[in-house]
Amino acid sequence: MTDATMEERESKRIAYHEAGHAVMCYRQHVAFRHVTIVPEGDVSLGHVATTGYPASFQPDINEDAKTRDRVEREVMIFFAGAAAEEIAGLYDPELAGEWADNHALIDLASYVSSETEELEAYLAWLRLRTRNILSAAYLWSAVEGLVTALLAEKTIKVRRARAIIRASIAAYVQDEQHRAKIDASLASYFQKEAERERAAFEDASAALKANALA
């Protein structure tokens, strides 16, 4: 793989990551100011600038349903970057953005469940829920539309981002050729996921058999 090809792949990965965050913000009705793939310093390769938490959001002292709902929406927004990379076939867990997202979402989820086993199960459910929401065809169309715009424009303010998301959702509904392209890309992803899960199951079964015979 040439340097130019590697750079293009990395730009696409970052665009999918940030588009995933932005589309999940849109889906979860969480306000943001802009989305960008312009790096900041040594850690941030791009970001979605949100408007912050409302004053009423105090998970350290409130345990009501409203607070838990906000925690879950925020955690899924953090998960959505990696989920978009995964669906696009560009996932890399070793990179800085994923590390920062994981620390932030663990801190948030810990307000709801601090016991380790329960927290792990809670996060696993939210991660899967994020993947399933983002892989809904109409929302994946929105991710693809935002990725294309980000690669061309680098930084997109919220009003334009929302317009792109809405137009991409409408395109999925109205444009048969576009719908077929989105459906095909998702079908390919889920086929690879099924093959990966089957291989993992077979490896686990083989290990259990080996241990039983030892």
Image (tube, rainbow, N blue to C red):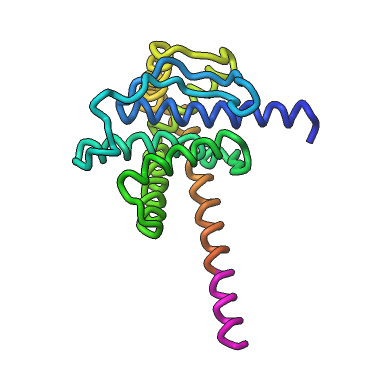
Residue 101 against residue 40 in the figure, above or below: below
The residue at the point 52 percent across, 67 percent down is 201
The residue at the point 38 percent across, 11 percent down is 159
Relative to 20, 30 lies left or right: left
Q: Nearer the viewer, residue 197 or 112?
A: 112
**Magenta part of the chain:** 202-214
Residue 1 against residue 42 in the figure, above or below: below
The residue at the point 38 percent across, 53 percent down is 119
Q: Quadrant of residue 203?
A: bottom right
Residue 121 against residue 103 in the figure, above or below: below
Which residue occupies the extreme bottom position in the image? Answer: 213
Quarter of the image for the N terminus: give it. Answer: top right
Give the x, y percent position of residue 139. 39, 31
Relative to 88, 123 lies left or right: left
Give the x, y percent position of residue 148. 54, 21
Give the x, y percent position of residue 13. 60, 32
